[in-house]
Image (cartoon, rainbow, N blue to C red):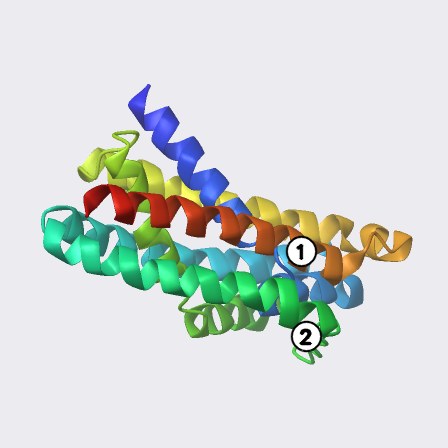
Amino acid sequence: MEITITFCIALLVAFVGVIPPGLLNMTAAKVSIKEGHTRGLVFSAGVCVIVVLQTLIALVFARYLSNHPDVVDIMQRVAFVLFVLLTVYFLVVAKKTDKPNVETNVKSKKSRFFQGILLSALNVFPIPYQAYMAITFVSFTWIKLDPVGISAYVAGAATGTFVMLYIYVFFFEKINSKRIKSQKGMNLTIGMITGVISIITLVNIIKEM
């Protein structure tokens, strides 16, 4: 049961993390539109290979931090500042920006797979994001960072990332054609989510003072 809960939590955390339109999901969508769904999924598979490594690094870091409460206190304060900045960005700045325009020229499936690996490796945000979320769930005793728990979490994170990319690959064109508030509405939603996380983090900091 604990494995299932850990897997589902990681899946949800990763799924939410890939929702905002960005380089990876927009590239997956454009590859799918221009070259077919298969190549979009191959690109997504390459992304998930790096997600597995990044999540593993994040969990090892989180396990270390969970054994050093003094470091966790510092990290909570840093995380609070980062989430506040993200909230401001998504609510104020990002509402004025256009959708990212990612042009892709590579054609082969193999090159798409390695392109997914490369672009995902350049995106290091999942490491601190997953580390912080893991520490939070460990503090709630919802997950354990033992070898089994780490394996379940990594599998869930990879699955959640792939599911969100799958949605972009197969449904982006339909969603885009209907003009469902596109990036502005999405930025507002993500800004609200990061705002809630900021408040939760602030409450935890105050409780520990």
Residue in the picture at 31% in, 38% down: 137
Q: Nearer the viewer, residue 41 or 180?
A: 180
Residue in the picture at 56% in, 73% down: 111
Q: Nearer the viewer, residue 45 or 194?
A: 194
Say which of marks 1 and 2 sits in front.
Answer: 1
- Which label number is shown at residue 188? 1
- Judge whether residue 135 can be spotted in this image: no
- Which label number is shown at residue 122? none
Q: Nearer the viewer, residue 35 or 60?
A: 60
The residue identified by callout 2 is 107
Disc 1 to disc 2, C-alpha distance: 35 Å
Q: Residues within 10 Å of mark 2 (few under 14, many from 20)?
A: few
Where residue 9 appears, x then y in whole percent?
A: 42, 35
Which amino acid type is shown beneath numbered disc 1?
A: Leu
- Judge whether residue 118 can be spotted in this image: yes
Which amino acid type is shown beneath numbered disc 2?
A: Lys
Q: Residues within 10 Å of mark 1 (few under 14, many from 20)?
A: some
